[in-house]
Amino acid sequence: MKVHMVAICGTGMGALAGLLKEAGHDVRGSDKAFYPPMGERLQAWGIPTQQGFDAARITPDLDLVVVGNACRQDNPEARAALERGLKVMSFPQALGEMFIEGRRSIAVCGTHGKTTTASLLAYMLVQAGRDPSFLVGGVPTNFGKSFHVGRGTDFVVEGDEYDTAFFDKRPKFVHYRPRVVVLTAVEYDHADIYPDMDAYRRAFQGLVGLLPPDGLLIGCADDPEVRALFPRAACPSVGYGLAADAGYRVLESAADGQGMAFRVRGPDGAEARLRLPLAGRHNVLNATAALAVLGHLGLGLEEAARTWEGFLGIARRLEVRGVAAGVTVLDDFAHHPTKVRETVRAARLRYPRANLVAVFEPRTNTSRRKVFQELYPGSFEGADRVVVVPPFGVDGLPAAERFDSAALVAALRARGLQAELRASADEVVSEVSPGLPEGSVVLVMSNGAFDGIHEKLLAALRRRGG
C-alpha cells in the first residue's frame, strides 16, 4: 500500500510509520517540525518526510491516509483526504486493524510507566524466544527502534488514554483489542481532554470492560484507583507492588550501583532475589509488572528475570546525553508531578554523591496549565538546585489558566531548595554551565525538544573544559 501520514513525527505515528515500512508498505509523511528522537529515527529508517502541511500531497494514488491526533480538523492534508473520499484512519485504528488483529494483545496502560514497562516486556519476550510484535512510545536502546513485526503470537502495545483523533475522541487504547492489560497507575492527567477525575476514571473503566473472560488484568495493587477497577473485569485480576495482598509482592528493594536489587514473592509463594539494570523504585514496580506478564505466559520469576539481562533502557528515560568537563547531562520525558518526583529520586539513587541540578520545562497540555501548580513543589526533593523556565506555548491559554513557573520557584525556595527562574533554554545554558563543578549531574525534564538544550549545554561545557 501507498500510505501518507499526517503529523508523522509524533512518537506513536513515527513508530507506526516504521512498522508499516517494515511490513513492506510505501510510507511517507509530513509534520510541522521534526524533533529528536523521532525526527532522526524517521530519516534513519529511510522514510521520506516533508515539513509543513500541503493539500497537494494528498494524491489519488494513496491507498491510506493516517491522521495523527496532533492534527486539528482544519489541517489542510487531513481535510483534503476526507473531502476527496480517500481511506482515512487514525493511528490507533490503523495499528489495531492492520497489526494487532489476530494476535494476543498485551496492552500496557496507565498514567505513568507505560513506555518503560512495555519496552522492558517486549525485550524480555524477545529474549525468551517468543519473537513478539511491539509498538511503544519511546525508543528502546537495544532495538534502536520502537516497533517490530514479529512471528510470535504476542503484540505488546503501549496503550495511551489520550484521544484518538479529531474525528474520534475515544481513548487510543480502545482500538487495541486487549487480552492482557497491565495497568500501572490511574492518576489525573490530560486536563485538555478530561475535565475532571471522574471523566479520566471512566476511560479506564472502559478499558477494563474490553477484556474478555479469558483475559487477564495485571494492576498495581498500591494504587487505590487501580484496585477499584479489579471487580469490573470479566476476567481474573492479579496485583503487583508493595501491598501485602499483591500477587507479585515486592518485599524489599535498594539501589545497587547503576540499577536496583530487589526481592519478589510470586502468587505460588516462591521468592527470588533479582537485579534490574534500571534506577529508581518506580522501575522496580514496572519490572514486577513485566514479571507478572511472563508468569502468565508460563515463566517463573528467576527465569523471567534472566530475560532482562542486557536491557539498556529507553531514549529520554534517564538517558545520558553526554559527559563534558566532568558534568553528566541526562534527558528525561518526565512532566507529571509524580513522574518528576520519581525521576528526581531515581537520579539521586543513581548518582548519590553528585551535585544534582534539575531543569524543568512545563510543556505538556496539562503541565503548562495550573492543574498541578500545588503538587509540583513536592516533586524536586533530592535535587541540590532546581532551574525552571516559563511554560511552553501558552499564548492560546487564558492567563488565569497558565502554569506559574515563578510561583513554583518561590514555593521551592520556601521549602529550602535552591531554585531559580530562567527565561529560556539559552539562558539556562549561559547561567548554569559556568558554575557547575566537576562531578555534577544535570537532569533535564521536558517532553519536547526544549530548544536543543542538551547539546547546547554539552557544547558550553566542552568550551569551558577546553
Image: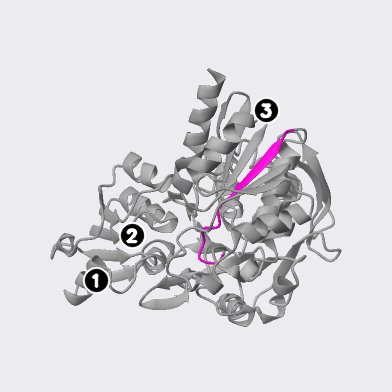
Based on the picture, tell me whether residue 266 belongs to the magenta stretch.
no
Q: Nearer the viewer, mark 1 or mark 2?
A: 2
Q: Residue furthest top?
A: 466
Which residue: 44% across, 63% down?
100
Residue 166: percent from left, percent from top: 37, 75
Secondary structure mainly formed by the magenta segment: loop
Mark 1 or mark 3, earlier in chain: 1
- The residues tagged by marks 1 and 2 sit, at their Cα atoms, a distance apart of 17 Å
Boundaries of the magenta span: 354-366
- 230 relative to 450 in the view: left or right: right
Mark linked to residue 437:
3
Mark linked to residue 87:
1
Q: Secondary structure at mark 2?
A: loop
Give the residue type that dot 3 points to: Pro
Mark linked to residue 460:
none
The crowd level at tag 2 (other Cα within 10 Å; few <14, some 14-19, many 20+) is many
- The residues tagged by marks 2 and 3 sit, at their Cα atoms, a distance apart of 41 Å
Residue 361: percent from left, percent from top: 55, 53
Q: Is residue 191 visible?
A: no
Which residue: 48% across, 35% down?
455
- In the displayed structure, 435 sits above or below 146; it is above
Q: Secondary structure at mark 1?
A: loop
Q: Nearer the viewer, residue 75 or 411?
A: 411
The way the protein has been coloured in the rendering is one colour
Residue 355: percent from left, percent from top: 72, 35
Q: Quadrant of residue 185?
A: bottom right
Give the residue type that dot 2 points to: Ala
Q: Secondary structure at mark 3?
A: loop
The crowd level at tag 1 (other Cα within 10 Å; few <14, some 14-19, many 20+) is few
The crowd level at tag 3 (other Cα within 10 Å; few <14, some 14-19, many 20+) is few
Residue carrying label 2: 7
- The residues tagged by marks 1 and 3 sit, at their Cα atoms, a distance apart of 57 Å
